[in-house]
Amino acid sequence: VSCFNNKYSNGVFLIKVLLVIASIGGWLTYISTQLINVQNNFFQYEIFLMVSYLLFGAGIAVLPLASELSIECTYPKGQGLINGIFDIGTNLGQFIYGVLFYSIPREVTDQKILDENQCNLSESSESTVLDFTTPLLILVICYSIGALLPIFFLEVPYLRKKADNQAKCEKNSAFVVS
């Protein structure tokens, strides 16, 4: 990704494009899982599902670019601090979503789905088949909001670039005066 960030404005544009692609992929993933649930045929939609996962995965390419741009915003703070904040934020988000994800699903009551379940659940088992449609929808909505906010509000002051340019100017002026 850094090869696209050779000019500073390209990095902001690229991060916005990748976030839009990932958001579209998230919604396509949700739609494809709903189609599989309705049709009860995974193999009919496997190509659609793979393409949507690839688009959703475009969000992963944002991470190194976001790290680089965040260093530009917080200069002279170190990269370790920024990565630590990213790690804490990621872990906190995963914990919150994990608690929500497993507390919201509801039991499946459709007898046809229960008869055709592939979970190897017997009728005497205490485990039940759960429907994770609502948690998946909440995940996609949260991800879309989180991905679309930077598109409208991302501004990078390029503090490190300004400091580097100032240092070059001082070095060049010192060379000329000597």
Image (spheres, grey):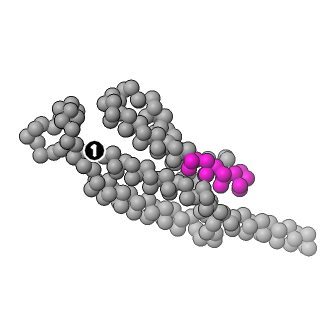
In the displayed structure, 134 sits above or below 118; it is below
Q: Residue at x 57, y 64 (%)?
A: 79
How packed is label 1: few (under 14 Cα within 10 Å), some, or many (20 or more)?
some
Q: Position of residue 159 (x, y in %)?
A: 69, 68
Q: Residue at x 64, y 49 (%)?
A: 14
Q: Position of residue 109 (x, y in %)?
A: 20, 42
Q: Amino acid at mark 1?
A: Asp
Q: Is label 1 in a helix, a strand or a loop?
A: strand
Q: Is residue 62 visible?
A: yes
In the displayed structure, 168 sits above or below 137; it is below
Query: Between residues 177 and 84, which one lies in front from this camera angle?
Result: 84
Query: Between residues 37 and 98, which one lies in front from this camera angle?
Result: 37
Whether the magenta-drawn stretch holds residue 170 is answered as no
Q: Residue furthest right?
A: 177
Q: Residue furthest top?
A: 44
Q: Is residue 61 visible?
A: no
**Which span of residues is magenta-colored?**
6-20
Whether the magenta-drawn stretch holds residue 7 is answered as yes
Quarter holding the C terminus is bottom right
Query: Between residues 62 and 51, which one lies in front from this camera angle?
Result: 51
Q: Position of residue 147 (x, y in %)?
A: 53, 54
Q: Is residue 120 left or right of residue 44?
A: left
Report which residue position mark 1 lands on.
131
Q: Is residue 54 left or right of residue 134?
A: right
In the displayed structure, 65 sits above or below 121; it is below
Q: Residue at x 39, y 53 (%)?
A: 138
Q: Is residue 162 left or right of residue 122?
A: right
Magenta portion: prevailing SS class: helix
